[in-house]
Image (cartoon, grey):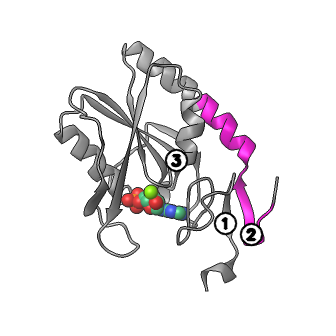
Amino acid sequence: MWENKDIKKVLVTAEQIQKRSEELGKEITEDYRKMNSAPLVVALLKGSVPFMSELIKHIDLDCQFDFMDVTSYAGTESTGDIKILKDLDTSVKGLDILIVEDIIDTGRTLDTVAKMLLHKGAKSVKIVTLLNKASRRTVDVKGDYIGFEVENEFVVGFGLDFNQRYRCLPYIGVLKDECYQ
Ligand code: IMP
Ligand code: MG
């Protein structure tokens, strides 16, 4: 595995991400088969793109996918007061939606997006997230499918950024303290 000078420690390796994505893909396939459905896979830009690309290889259903870009209005702390930067091209009316997220932190972003999709007539909304930071949750959002639990520390890589950097790392890691100065 190639190294990045700014990474203090690797939390989840590329191999672990691949293996877990395969497991989640199989589980999702079985669940939607039971419902006789194939979900519209909705990836939230930009962080969930690498995970979505890995995951959909293992979902053996006739799925379509689409993208949404939302941002929180105030500062860095998620407020739940979100602004849609890019909406879906597809109408969600009557569809089973599977939202793909990089990480659930406070849960506010996903809570708002899920409610919005249901309000627009989605039949069901489920969430698959690569990472879950359960200790930070302020609203009651549960990921239906969770890749890995992480402690309350800031992580980067495999889509996750710090000031737009480090998204392209093939693993999840923690930055050295001096990178925040
Ligand atoms: P929340 O669940 O509404 O608080 O917001 C989740 C979003 O915050 C994620 O989609 C990420 O974009 C961002 N985020 C939360 N924690 C981290 C982290 O540790 N590293 C990078 N981005 C994070
Ligand atoms: Mg995000």
Q: Amino acid at mark 1?
A: Val
Return the disc, 1 or 3, that comes first in the chain's sequence. Answer: 3
Return the disc, 1 or 2, that comes first in the chain's sequence. Answer: 2
Residue 174: mark in rendering? 1
Percent x, y for residue 118? 22, 38
Q: Are marks 1 and 2 in contact (CB under 8 Å)?
A: yes
What residue is pinned by disc 3? 49
Q: Is residue 19 left or right of residue 134?
A: right
Q: Residue at x 53, y 72 (%)?
A: 163
Q: Amino acid at mark 3?
A: Val
Percent x, y for residue 149? 57, 50
Is 16 colored magenta in this rendering?
Answer: yes
Chain part drawn in magenta? 3-23
In this picture, is 100 found above or below 86? above
SS at circle 2: strand
Return the disc, 3 or 2, that comes first in the chain's sequence. Answer: 2
Observer-side mark, 1 or 3, equals 3
Identify the image quadrant of residue 136. bottom left
Is 93 colored magenta in this rendering?
Answer: no
Q: Is residue 126 left or right of residue 120?
A: right
| Distance between mark 1 and mark 2 Cα atoms | 6 Å
Percent x, y for residue 161? 55, 64
Q: Residue at x 41, y 28 (%)?
A: 64
Q: Amino acid at mark 2?
A: Lys
Ligand 2 picture quarter: bottom left
SS at circle 1: strand
Q: Is residue 47 left or right of residue 155?
A: left
Q: Is residue 53 left or right of residue 108?
A: right
What residue occupies the far bottom of the structure in this picture?
Answer: 181
Q: Is residue 136 visible?
A: no
What residue is pinned by disc 2? 8
